[in-house]
Image (cartoon, grey):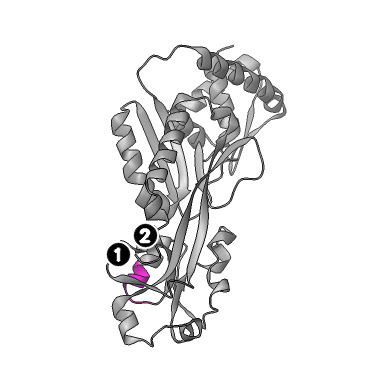
């Protein structure tokens, strides 16, 4: 039995789609399909049933899966004890992160990492939603909620601070804000409530119930742009808003929020050299940027 066929089978079983498996393996989706067809010919029956949402394991596929997972564990064990080639980490690593953090903090640093390791490739999913580790959407996920289920490795990456911000010209022409009650005179920018992907992004409930929202978006960068345009006030990450000279903090002592970034990966991937390299690198760059993520009370 060809292990190359089997590892393509394993990734398709985990990803659920040819495209998802191909991205994880760093190949074209037609390559995955070709290996699956070859394996099904050897097995004498179909291993997947095609559905609208992707590929579903057949009964034979479900019976085969535990045996292939055991083979994968054995291969990883051999890789752990094999001497290093000294060529550095190689292959594709997909990192999922929240939109603002992924775009502003991670993107330039991960690009630098690939320059240092030419054989390493990075897919960065900087999205305004939760990237699902359980669905194999990424190899490493940085989220606002700590994963509670599944065989995953989890570490606290960092705390970060958010404040209430407004555009300077907007604030100059609107009633002065010296206490929470003054916020009733202002419009607000925020997330779309029914599309909020985590309760960790609910801020205004603890601060002020706005009479109206001037602008709402699923995107934190879109909210930032709306505040810059003078649409109203918004709670934004300090690492995003403090660097913007058009914005200033409002009620900096009271309107201050702290949230946590958690980093996780599948337990079975912890011994892969490329995953270890990116995991360790992310911890280091975030550690170096603590003052950016948790700035002083006065920016």
Question: Relative to the observer, which residue lies in front, 118 or 9?
Answer: 118
Question: Relative to the observer, which residue lies in front, 50 or 290?
Answer: 290
Under circle 1, the secondary element is loop
- Residue 90 drawn above or below residue 209: above
Q: Is residue 170 magenta?
A: no
- Residue 125 drawn above or below residue 172: above
Q: Position of residue 276 (x, y in %)?
A: 47, 29
Residue at 65% across, 19% down: 70
Q: Is residue 82 left or right of residue 68?
A: left
- What is the crowding at mark 1: few (fewer than 14 residues within 10 Å), some, or many (at least 20)? few
**Label 2, on which residue?**
240
Work out which quarter of the rendered image holds the C terminus and state it.
bottom left
Tell me the distance, in whole angstroms, between the alpha carbons under discs 1 and 2: 7 Å
**Label 1, on which residue?**
244
Q: Are marks 1 and 2 in contact (CB under 8 Å)?
A: yes
Q: Which residues are magenta?
A: 225-231
Splitting the image into 4 quarters, where does residue 92 fall?
A: top left
Q: Position of residue 243 (x, y in %)?
A: 30, 61
Under circle 2, the secondary element is helix
| Residue 138 in view of the camera | no
Q: Position of residue 48 (x, y in %)?
A: 63, 30
Question: Relative to the observer, which residue lies in front, 106 or 67?
Answer: 106
């Amino acid at each position: 039995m060809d292990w190359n066929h089997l590892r393509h089978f394993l990734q398709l079983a985990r990803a659920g789609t040819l495209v998802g498996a191909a991205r994880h393996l760093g190949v074209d989706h037609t390559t995955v399909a070709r290996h699956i067809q070859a394996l099904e010919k050897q097995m004498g029956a179909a291993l997947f049933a095609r559905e609208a949402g992707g590929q579903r394991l057949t009964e034979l596929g479900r019976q085969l899966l535990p045996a292939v997972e055991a083979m994968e564990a054995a291969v990883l064990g051999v890789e752990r004890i094999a001497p290093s080639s000294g060529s550095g980490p190689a292959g594709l690593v997909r990192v999922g992160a929240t939109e603002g953090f992924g775009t502003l903090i991670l993107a330039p640093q991960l690009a630098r990492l690939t320059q240092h390791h030419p054989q390493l490739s990075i897919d960065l999913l900087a999205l305004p939603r939760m990237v699902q580790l359980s669905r194999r959407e990424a190899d490493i996920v940085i989220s606002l909620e700590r994963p509670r289920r599944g065989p995953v490795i989890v570490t606290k990456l960092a705390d970060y601070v958010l404040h209430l911000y407004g555009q300077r010209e907007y604030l100059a022409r609107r009633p002065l804000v010296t206490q929470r009650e003054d916020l009733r005179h202002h419009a607000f920018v925020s997330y779309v409530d029914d599309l909020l992907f985590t309760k960790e992004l609910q801020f205004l409930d603890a601060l002020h119930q706005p009479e109206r929202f001037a602008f709402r978006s699923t995107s934190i960068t879109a909210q930032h742009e709306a505040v810059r345009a003078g649409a109203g006030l918004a709670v934004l990450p300090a690492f995003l808003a403090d660097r913007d000279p058009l914005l200033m903090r409002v009620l900096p002592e009271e309107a201050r929020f702290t949230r946590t970034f958690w980093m996780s990966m599948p337990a079975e991937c912890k011994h892969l050299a490329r995953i270890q390299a990116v995991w360790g690198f992310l911890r280091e760059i975030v550690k170096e940027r603590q003052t950016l993520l948790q700035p002083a009370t006065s920016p």
